[in-house]
Amino acid sequence: MAAYAVIPGFHRKLHELHYVNAHTESLSRVENPNGRLFESLPDQVAVPINSGDVIFGDARLIHGAFPNEQLEDRTIITLWFHSYCDSLTLALQSRISEIFLRTGVDTDPAAPYKMTSSDWPDENRVGCDFYFPNKLAGIDQNPRCRIPERQ
């Protein structure tokens, strides 16, 4: 239980971790388990969860997992939800498209284990394309900024 950790209010106040790339391939592979992003922090809080639970959260809230000290694997499935894209500004649609296709974000889109809907077989895409944001050429995007305004 409680494998999930958050820092309450992180999305509202400036924290040193706002300046760290949080979703690199190196982090995903835990190449440096002694790195700053794997340390316990004094203001982190354990979220009480059990197998099969669902957590809804704001992506701007720092979050992570405590070390797995069990023999069993812990699986997490992450789903990102956005408003119906056609109802958003073109700039925001363009930004969401980049996130969805893993370009212009912290991750490496050429990484050997990356997977986007562009990599799916055609038969798996049928009926799903409606949900995928379209890549918009020549549109200035909303700037990406996960650093909250100073208060």
Image: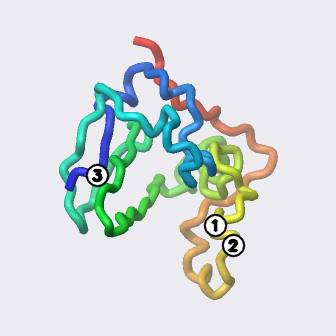
Vertical relation: 104 (above or below) 84 = above
Extreme-right residue of the structure:
138
Picture residue at 35% right of the left edge, 50% below the top: 67
The answer to whether one can see residue 93 in this image is: no
Q: Please name which of the two marks, 1 or 3, marks the residue nearer to the observer.
A: 3
Q: Residues within 10 Å of mark 1 (few under 14, many from 20)?
A: few
Q: Amino acid at mark 2?
A: Asp
Vertical relation: 150 (above or below) 140 = above
Left or right of 84: which side holds 66? left
The answer to whether one can see residue 39 in this image is: yes
Q: Determine contact: label 2, label 1, CB under 8 Å.
A: yes
The C terminus lies in quadrant: top left
Extreme-bottom residue of the structure:
123
Q: Position of residue 74 (x, y in %)?
A: 35, 64
Picture residue at 55% right of the left edge, 55% below the top: 85
Q: Which is more toward the observer, 143 or 104? A: 104
Give residue 3's mark: 3
Give residue 119's mark: 2
Q: Quadrant of residue 133?
A: bottom right
Number of callouts: 3
What residue is shown with label 1? 115
Picture residue at 71% right of the left edge, 55% below the top: 109
Q: Residues within 10 Å of mark 2 (few under 14, many from 20)?
A: few
Q: Quadrant of residue 10?
A: top left
Q: Secondary structure at mark 3?
A: loop
Vertical relation: 130 (above or below) 38 = below
Left or right of 95: which side holds 17? left
The CA span between labels 2 and 3 is 31 Å
Q: Amino acid at mark 1?
A: Met
Q: Amino acid at mark 3?
A: Ala
Task: Choose the circle earlier in sequence order: 1 or 3.
Answer: 3
Picture residue at 45% right of the left edge, 39% below the top: 38
